[in-house]
Image (cartoon, rainbow, N blue to C red):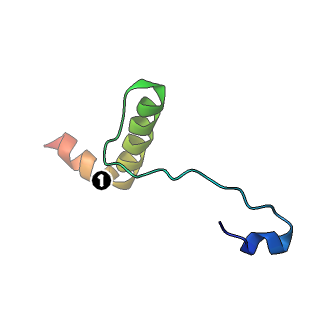
Amino acid sequence: MNTKIEIYGVKAVKRPKISASKKLDLTGESGQQIVKSETKLVLRTHKRTFEKLADM
């Protein structure tokens, strides 16, 4: 446990270990939000590219 933060008056809390997985669940409301936000980011980042593709 990390006791370095106790110097500042914050009590250290034991947290469970969560193993990483490569599976991403996009079902449900939270999955839809992930897809929407990533789509907006891609469209904003590559705006000219999509405009060129639309004009082909």
Q: Which of 1 and 23 is in front in this view?
A: 1
Relative horizontal placement of residue 54, taking residue 41 as reference (left or right):
left
**Residue neighbourhood size for the residue with mark 1, other residues' Cα within 10 Å, grouped as few (<14), some (14–19), many (≥20):** few
Looking at the picture, how far across and down is residue 50, in whole percent? 26, 46
Q: Which amino acid does label 1 sit on?
A: Arg
Farthest-out residue, left:
56
Q: Where is residue 54 in the image (x, y as percent from the top left)?
A: 21, 40
* Residue at horizontal 36 percent and vertical 35 percent from the top: 25
Is 4 positioned to the left or the right of 41 in the image?
right
Q: Is residue 54 above or below residue 13?
A: above
**Percent x, y of residue 9:** 86, 67
**Residue at x-position 84% and y-position 72%:** 8
> Outermost residue, right direction?
9
Closer to the camera, 42 or 8?
8
**Residue 21: where, in percent of width, then height?**
35, 48
- Whether residue 24 is situated above or below residue 42 in the rendered picture: above
27 lies above or below 2: above
Q: In which quarter of the image is the C terminus?
A: top left
The answer to whether residue 50 is left or right of residue 6 is left
Q: Splitting the image into 4 quarters, where does residue 36 fall?
A: top left
Assign the N terminus to one quadrant of the image: bottom right
Identified at 73% across, 75% down, the residue is 4
Farthest residue toward the top?
A: 28
| Residue shown at 40% from the left, 44% from the top | 38
Q: For the residue labelled by badge 1, is the local secondary structure a helix, a strand or a loop?
A: helix
Work out whether residue 56 or residue 11 is closer to the camera in this orientation and state it: 11
Q: Name the residue under label 1.
A: 48
